[in-house]
Amino acid sequence: MSCSCDIMRALKVKLLVQIKDEQRVKMDKEGHFMKIDRLIGILSILLQQEKVTAPYLAEKFEVSRRTINRDIEDLCKAGIPLVTTQGQNGGISIMEGYRIDRTVLTSSDMKAILTGLKSLDTVSGTGRYQQLMDKLSVKGSLRETENNHIYINLSSWYQSSLVPKMELIQQAIHQRHIITFDYYGPNGESQKTLEPYLLVFQWSAWYVWGYCRDREDCRMFKLNRMEEVKMTEEPYELRDVKPFDPSPYTPFPSHYLVKALCQPEMKWRLIEEFGRDSFTVQEDGNLLFEFGFSEKWNIYSWVLSMGTEIELLEPKELREEFAHMTRKIAAKYAKPG
C-alpha cells in the first residue's frame, strides 16, 4: 500500500498546516505523495535533533543531496524557518526560538504514528511501513520504547487474498482509475463498477468506499465479498459528494429493530458484540435484547449462533419467517443420514 495512507494524511494536515494554498495544490496535482512523506520525515527528524547534515538526510531517505536541498527550500516556503550553516559543525536546523512549531510532533505524537504504521504492516504483507518507520525514527529511539504499550493487528484469516486486492485498490485510488469486480452479497451475485475513494477498516473487516456507477451513489463494499477485482484504464474525476462518514450506522442503516429474549448465560455475547446498553435485565433474570440490524440474514445467522439460548420476538414477520426456515432445517436433519 502507498505511504499516503490515512495516518500519513492526518499527519500531513497537522504538520503542513502552514503551507500556502498554492503550494499544497501544486503538490496534490503532481501527486507527490512520496515527497510529502519525505518532508514529514525531514521535519520530524529536525524536531528531534538540533542539527543534521544534507548528506545524512540524503542517505536516510535514499535521494540525492540536490533533492534534499529542494525539500529544505519547500519547507522554508511553507513557513518552517530552517537555517543552514556552513563549516565543520554546520548543518540544517530549525531557527532558534521557533518553539511553538517544535511541538508539532511531540514524542507522544511520534509514538502514536509509529504504532499506527506498525499496525499497517500486519496487513500489507510488504514491510513497507517498517521502512517508513525506520526513516521517521531517529536511531530507532522511538520505535521500541518502554512506553509503547499498544499493538494493533489488522490482519485476517484471508490475508493471502486480501493483500493483492488492497494493493490494487490503493493504486486505483492514487491514479484515480475505475475498478470493476464481481460482488457476492445476500441478494446474489452482481458485477460492479466503482470509482474508489477510500479503503476503510471497520467492524473488524476491510471495505472500499466510493461512487458506484451502477447505483449512482456512494457505497461500501466488503473486500472479502469481492472477486475478479480489476483496475481499468478509464480515469475518473472526483465528484462533489459528501465526505465519508465514519459513523458505524451510516453505511448500513438499520432496517429492522430486533427484540429478542436471551438466557442470562448469553450476557457476555451481548456485551461483547453490541454493548451493555443493548439489553435490559428482566425480573426473571432473562435479558431483553433490542438492537437495529440492516439485513435480515444477519439477524437469522446471529440468532442461530445463539442456539436455544435465545427467542426472536420482533419483528413479527421475521419471527414467522425464521420459524418456517427452522422447521425446514429440522426436517432435513430428521431424515436418516
Image (cartoon, helix red, strand yellow):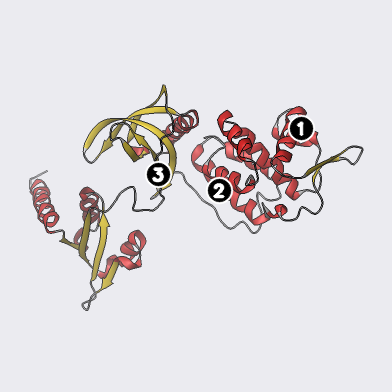
N-terminal-most mark, 3 or 1: 1
Which amino acid lies under the numbered mark 3 shown in the image of this protein? Lys
In this rendering, the answer to whether 105 lies above or below 239 is below
Which amino acid lies under the numbered mark 2 shown in the image of this protein? Gly
Residue indicated by mark 1: 69
User: Mark 3: which secondary structure?
Assistant: loop
Task: Tell me if mark 1 has few (under 14), some (14-19) or many (20+) residues whose alpha carbon lies within 10 angstroms of its own.
Answer: some
Residue 268 lies, in percent from the top left, at 33, 65
- The answer to whether residue 138 shows anywhere in this view is no
- The answer to whether residue 223 shows anywhere in this view is yes
In this rendering, the answer to whether 228 lies above or below 210 is above
N-terminal-most mark, 1 or 2: 1
Foreground residue, 288 or 100?
A: 100
Give the number of the mark in front: 1 or 2: 1
In this rendering, the answer to whether 317 lies above or below 36 is below
Q: Which mark is residue 242?
A: 3
Residue pushed farthest top? 233
Foreground residue, 315 or 216?
A: 216
The quadrant in which residue 231 appears is top left
Which amino acid lies under the numbered mark 1 shown in the image of this protein? Asn
N-terminal-most mark, 3 or 2: 2
